[in-house]
Image (tube, rainbow, N blue to C red):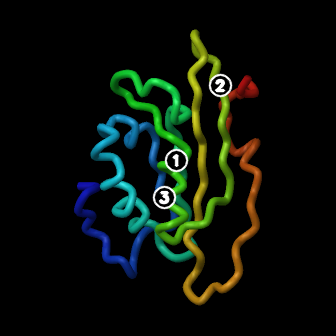
Amino acid sequence: DLFAPAVQSSAGFQLVVEIYTLQVLHPGRRAAALAPLASLVAPGGELWIIARGRDEEDDPGQLPWPLLRAELATFTELGLVERSFEDYLDDETPPLRRFVARYRRPAAGSRTRPPRLNCAGCWTLRRRKRR
């Protein structure tokens, strides 16, 4: 249950992968899922997110509701550091906008911000630049 994870805050996982789950939560309920999701990431661990994306002025449409970049920025307020963020159009017809984001929880006792990494090449999806 994402809204009541059983993992203790001192534990967590080295890798948490969220693919298309947040976008099926109603936007009014989605914010409540971000803190529990971030809490699953152990010190030194990473959170990877793949989701449909949109701008604030875009119509959210119907299920699945694309995420806003500002919604994902909440993870930095929850103690995670953004490692990379990709915004692209996929190869579907018509093309759909996608976000691929990587966040890292600093290791215990870490005082320095980890370097930002370009995740290009981490994914096997063929990307086209957003127009």
Q: Quadrant for residue 94, please give it.
A: top right
Disc 3/disc 1 C-alpha distance (Å): 13 Å
| Residue that mark 2 sits on | 89
Q: What amino acid type is highlighted by mark number 3?
A: Thr
User: Which of these two is toward me, 53 or 11?
Assistant: 53
**Front position among marks 3 and 1:** 3
Sequence-first tag of 3 and 1: 1
Q: Please tell me whether mark 3 or mark 2 is closer to you in this view.
A: 3
Q: Position of residue 86 (x, y in %)?
A: 67, 42
Q: Earlier in the sequence, mark 3 or mark 2?
A: 3
Instruction: Give the Cα separation between the discs numbered 2 and 1.
Output: 16 Å
Nearer to the camera, 93 or 7 = 93
Up-down: is 34 above or below 29? below
Q: Amino acid at mark 1?
A: Ile
The N terminus sits in image quarter: bottom left
Q: Which residue is mark 3?
A: 74
Residue 24 is situated, as x and y percent measured from the top left of the image, at: 34, 35
Residue at image location 75% in from the left, 57% down from the top: 117
Q: The disc labelled 2 sits on which kind of residue?
A: Leu
Indicate the secondary structure of the residue bearing disc 2.
strand
Query: Looking at the picture, does residue 119 appear above or below residue 76?
Result: above
**Identity of the residue furthest to the bottom in this view:** 109
Percent position (x, y) of residue 36? 34, 62
Neighbour tally class for label 2: few under 14, some 14-19, many 20 plus, Cα within 10 Å: some
Query: Residue 53 at x, y = what percent?
Result: 53, 34
Circles 3 and 1 in contact, beta carbons < 8 Å: no
Dot 3 lies on which element?
A: helix
Q: Residues within 10 Å of mark 3 (few under 14, many from 20)?
A: some
Quadrant assignment for the C terminus: top right
Which residue corresponds to mark 1? 49
* Label 1 crowd (10 A; few <14 / some 14-19 / many >=20): some
